Structures are given as structure tokens and as C-alpha cells.
Amino acid sequence: MPTTHPFFLRRSTFAFLLMGLGLLADASESNTPLTPEAIKPACLAPLKTERVSIERVTDGDTVVLTDNRRVRLIGINAAELNEPNKQLRQAAVQATDELVRLLPKGESLVLYFGAEKFDRHGRTLAHVTRESDGLAVAQLLVSMGLAVQTTVAPTTQCTNHFASIEAKARANNLGLWKLHDLWQVDARNLTTKNLGFKFVTGTVTSVNIGKRFSEVYLDDTLRILVRPPLAKQLPLESYQGQRLEIRGWLSHRKQQVFLWAQHAANLRVLDD
């Protein structure tokens, strides 16, 4: 089994398809269980807040407020609505529908802000809870397997909480975890066409420790860049020859595919 170091239908008309794929949660759409771990987790307490109202949901990890701000939920990634793969696309619609159900138009929310307030697309970054009952919607989506934990440094306050919730969903093969093979890529098969969020597995073929950043190569194909603060937390040199799974957003430069390692929770050492 993998070991984790402490350190991802048109609405109701596709419901029957999702049931056939085993994607629907055990609870019916009207009574999704509000698990204790998704009720205003302690990691949110130190963060600055703002009270707002929702206008609409755009996908499984983004909402629009009544003041027209777009908010990207911190700590998670859901499948994309334009996914070329039909099953992943259906999973994206399910995540979107669940978020619509949880956050109807006009619902009062509390935003909790992390270390960065905006992403590179200009969206506001926030943990989102319902004001009425403290429900942290991102955590609930992860617990249902409708989204995966995805940390982007330096906003890491709730990473361990997300990772704990995800571990249960993964162990129970919920939602997206049934489709893991569809969004996991073997490093040996990577090309510059493999962009966006992926889980990549491969064998570490070289490790270079540097001052500005360190490098870990999977199968001499994927270049993983590690900033010094994270490099100090990880036993990078011991990874030589081991199989890893890493999640993140793939990019490329001069025909070299790379990603930045953001947090130890985004990396797993795989047993043989």
C-alpha cells in the first residue's frame, strides 16, 4: 500500500449515469451528511474573515459573490467541466451540482483568507463556510470524493486537515477515487501536451540539491522543483530509486515538463 509522509451530466439528467458509474455518494442529494470534520475546522480560527452572499456557482471549486467577485476555494481541486474524458466530465458536473445545492443563491457565507488573497487569474482565494451552520464546503466535497486536496504554498494552514479527510475518501474509493486511473499519468508517458492538474507517478532517477531550489526527476522526464523551505522538510536524497506519486499543475518550458512541489502532503512514496 502507498505510504503518506507527514508532511482531484448535465445536472439531474445525468444522475442515472453517475449512479451506474458508482460516483454518487451514499447519501441522497437532499440529505448529504454534514460530517464534524467539515464544520468550521479549527485551522480556520486564526484567519481573517469577511461576510458575503453568493450569486452563483460556476464549477466544483469556484463561486461568484453578489458583488461579482469570483472566489476560488482554497485547498481543493475538482474535475473540470470541459474535461475531454466523459467520466471525469460527469464527475465535474456532480461536484458543481453539489456545490449549487450547498450554496443556493443569496446564501450568507463567511470567507476565511489565507496567506495569499488572489490567484494568478485574479480570483479571490478563500475558505468558504456557510454562516448559518459553519459548514466548510470544500472539506465536505473532499470527504465525498468530489474534489481532492491540493495545497498551493504559502496558503497551507488547513493542509493537514484536508489530507486527513481525503485519506478516508481515498481508502473508501469514493467519487473521483474510482476514476483515479483516468487522471493519473505515468512519468514515462509525459509529453508537453500533458498540462494542467495531474497525478504523476514514476521512479526517481536523479536528485539535485540546490540553494535556489532543488530538483527531483521522475524517469528522467518530469522535473519536480522544490523550494528550500520544503526541501528542508523532505528527505529528498533518500528518494533516489524510489517510486513517487506527486500531484500538481504541469507546465513545460523548452520541451521540459515540470511542476513545482507545493507541500509534503502533495507527495507520496509508493511501496513496491
Image (spheres, rainbow, N blue to C red):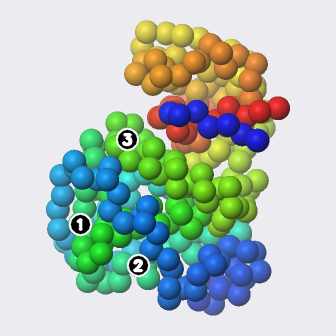
- Left/right of residue 47 with respect to residue 38 in the rendered view: left
Q: Earlier in the sequence, mark 1 or mark 3?
A: 1
Q: CA distance from mark 1 to mark 3?
A: 19 Å
Q: Looking at the figure, which quarter contains the N terminus?
A: top right
Is residue 18 positioned above or below 248 on the image? below
Question: As displayed, is residue 272 above or below residue 99?
Answer: above
Residue at the spot 58% in from the left edge and 33% down from the top edge:
5
Chain-order first, disc 1 or disc 2: 2
Pointer 1 local density, CA inside 10 Å: few below 14, some 14–19, many at least 20: many
> Mark 3: which secondary structure?
loop
In the picture, residue 84 is in which quadrant?
A: bottom right
Amino acid under disc 3: Thr
Name the residue rendered at 42%, 41% in the picture: 152
Q: Position of residue 44 (x, y in %)?
A: 29, 53
Residue under pointer 3: 156
Q: Which residue is mark 1?
A: 110
- Which image quarter: residue 99? bottom left
Q: Tag 2, which secondary structure?
A: helix
